[in-house]
Image (spheres, rainbow, N blue to C red):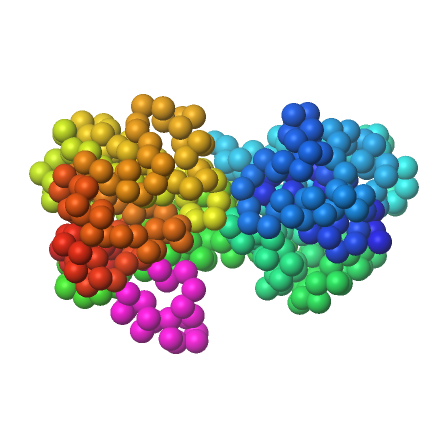
């Protein structure tokens, strides 16, 4: 058993904490939000993530998982301290204010050798920054080591991704520090790569940026397919069958969103610029993504003869299925676009609806897909939730003002939808 503190209880921190506790470690999760901490003590997570409530309850009931607002005391009681706070995008790259706050708080709790782990996605040089902050508080280097250990979890499958990672990256200056992380992760029996700080910090940015590039590439191909009369699904299958390319992240759609891809791509562009390189390729990756949803909306607007006076139903509001996260969600882009052009919007999402209602109380909401379709001039699939896979399209068609479905995730087979009398449009196929 290893004593661990995890500072930050967002997606990365909370998932890390509950999984490490489930592996048999003694874990203290820390957050400066007292209300959030009290909820966690009662088994109420601040995020929606399949499986997290079960692990939270088990860890708490077995006494392996506790929660506090006290960074100093958590540090005193732990051998390894994870920094897993947010690093939101700022005007000059990732905002490290929360990482710095934690780094300034940790020294008061150092009562023996500690391994400080940067789990948050951070730019090159953060390992050095945290080290300098601790030394600035008079902590001798013999009392701590800083390690870079980027996460690679995906929202909606975060528990699985943490238990069965493709690889575990450990960036350290000393073998002893890396060995502590190897010991911690040994029960997972997954490949581990030991490297230096800088390489570890870049691996996360590079990985997410490359995946974002694949998505933007296939979305660019979808535009060509629409113009040429081809099917982007067939093109993606033909490409993905080449083992050098692979079939993952070749699903054309409305573009990528969420908290990771936009921030990490922007972060790598900023890091490149700071080191004298103009990463034009990634800038075009962003441009393609930013124009994908507006392009699909232009097709719908053309079909309807404008959005003024039209009612558009949205199936799904989260940026992806199995999460309540709406950060950079395509639904928000769609809502802004339609409303600004005189249309009205009604939306539904199984778990993210409350989050959207807080920022868009001006639109209507339904309790299911059929309510959203009622009286709509068009229906748009935005998020690929499982409950949308087996809809009664005849019932949908009968309730709509105009029986038009725009599938933004290529979820449906055209012939199946059209058999019900709905007019079907999707990405990567010409109208």
Pick the residue in front: 313 or 232: 313
Q: Residue at x 19, y 30 (%)?
A: 343
Left-right relation of 365 to 99: left
Report if residue 234 lies within the magenta region.
yes
Residue 253 position in % (x across, y down): 32, 53
Provide the residue span drawn in magenta.
233-252
Q: Quadrant of the N terminus?
A: bottom right
Residue 370 position in % (x across, y down): 28, 42
Q: Residue at x 62, y 44 (%)?
A: 53
Q: Residue at x 86, y 36 (%)?
A: 76
Viewer can see residue 147: no
Q: Name the chief secondary structure element in magenta.
A: loop
Left-right relation of 359 to 80: left
Q: Quadrant of the C terminus?
A: bottom left
Residue 155 position in % (x across, y down): 52, 48
Pick the residue in front: 28 or 7: 28
Left-right relation of 232 to 54: left
Q: Which residue appears farthest toward the top when viewing the image?
A: 362
Q: Is residue 240 above or below residue 130?
A: below
Q: Which residue appears farthest toward the bottom when viewing the image?
A: 242
């Amino acid at each position: 058993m290893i004593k661990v503190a995890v500072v930050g209880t967002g997606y990365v921190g909370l998932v890390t904490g509950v999984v490490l506790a489930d592996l048999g470690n003694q874990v203290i999760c820390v957050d400066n939000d007292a209300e959030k901490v009290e909820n966690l003590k009662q088994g109420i997570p601040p995020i929606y993530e399949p499986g997290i409530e079960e692990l939270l309850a088990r860890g708490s009931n077995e006494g392996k998982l506790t929660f506090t607002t006290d960074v100093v005391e958590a540090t005193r009681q732990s051998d390894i301290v994870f920094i897993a706070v947010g690093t939101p995008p700022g005007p000059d790259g990732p905002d490290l204010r929360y990482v710095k706050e934690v780094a300034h708080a940790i020294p008061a709790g150092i009562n023996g050798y500690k391994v400080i782990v940067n789990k948050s996605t951070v730019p090159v040089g953060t390992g050095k920054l945290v080290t300098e902050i601790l030394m600035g508080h008079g902590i001798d280097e013999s009392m701590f080591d800083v390690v870079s250990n980027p996460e690679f979890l995906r929202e909606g499958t975060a528990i699985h991704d943490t238990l069965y990672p493709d690889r575990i990256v450990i960036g350290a200056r000393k073998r002893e520090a890396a060995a502590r992380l190897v010991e911690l992760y040994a029960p997972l029996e997954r490949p581990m790569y030991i490297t230096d700080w800088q390489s570890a910090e870049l691996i996360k940015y590079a990985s997410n940026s490359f995946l974002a590039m694949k998505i933007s590439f296939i979305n660019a191909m979808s535009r060509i397919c629409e113009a040429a009369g081809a099917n982007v699904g067939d093109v993606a299958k033909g490409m993905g069958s080449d083992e050098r390319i692979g079939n993952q992240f070749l699903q054309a759609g409305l573009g990528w969103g969420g908290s990771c891809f936009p921030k990490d791509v922007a972060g790598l562009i900023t890091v490149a610029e700071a080191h004298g390189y103009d990463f034009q390729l990634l800038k075009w990756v962003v441009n393609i993504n930013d124009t994908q949803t507006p392009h699909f909306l232009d097709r719908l607007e053309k079909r309807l003869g404008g959005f003024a006076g039209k009612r558009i139903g949205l199936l799904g509001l989260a940026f992806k299925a199995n999460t309540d996260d709406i950060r950079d969600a395509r639904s928000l882009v769609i809502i802004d676009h339609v409303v600004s052009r005189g249309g009205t919007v009604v939306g539904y999402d199984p778990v993210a609806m409350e989050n959207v209602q807080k920022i868009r109380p001006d639109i209507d909401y339904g309790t299911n897909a059929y309510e959203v379709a009622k009286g709509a001039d068009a229906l748009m699939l935005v998020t690929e939730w499982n409950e949308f896979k087996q809809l009664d399209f005849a019932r949908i068609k009968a309730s709509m003002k105009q029986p038009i479905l725009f599938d933004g995730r290529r979820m449906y087979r055209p012939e199946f939808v059209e058999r019900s009398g709905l007019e079907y449009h999707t990405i990567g196929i010409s109208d």
